[in-house]
Image (spheres, grey):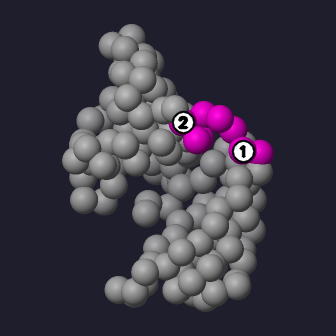
Amino acid sequence: MLAHYHRRIGMHLRVLEGTLRVQVGHVVRDLGPGREVEIPEEHLFRWKNPSAASARFVVELRPAPACLEKGLAALYGLARDGRTRRDGRPRSLLRTALLMQWTDIGLPGIYRWLGPVLRGLAAAACRRGIDRELEERYCP
């Protein structure tokens, strides 16, 4: 997962089984079962499973905006339909921009300049009806 942040969403992450490598800011930790971490809003983070064994974890969003749930439902739906790259990003740049907007994702450092470009692409996706297509197909 690419390091990113959410502008208005904080998280609480708890590992149920396996190991999860979590980076918050510049601090990287391997968390096992029962271990937890807080990810405040506007803090850079990422996580990954560092092993071949499966890992299960719970993420609590604070607040839990409906747009994030909608974005995740669409992203997982696209993945099920084979419409994402191996790393999980949608194959379509317009869909990627729209889902980044729905899920409140901000990019750090030099990538920050992409914000206005991505907002423009998300608006273009809406003009083309991609937002309605994703909602109808993937969002309950």
Specify few, some or many for label 2: CA neighbours under 10 Å numbering under 14, 14-19, or 20 or more.
some
**Residue at image x 54%, y 36%?**
70
**Residue at image x 56%, y 45%?**
106
Amino acid type, mark 1: Ala
From the viewer's side, name the closer residue of 54 and 106.
54
130 displayed left or right of 116: left
Which comes before the other along the chain, label 1 or label 2?
A: 1
In the rendered image of this protein, does residue 135 appear above or below residue 100? above
- The image quadrant that residue 14 belongs to is bottom right
Q: Which residues lie in the magenta part? A: 63-70
Amino acid type, mark 2: Lys
**From where the camera sits, is residue 28 visible?**
no
Report the residue marked by disc 2: 70
In the rendered image of this protein, does residue 8 appear above or below residue 131? below
Q: Is mark 2 on a helix, strand or loop?
A: helix
**Residue at image x 54%, y 75%?**
56
Report the residue marked by disc 1: 64
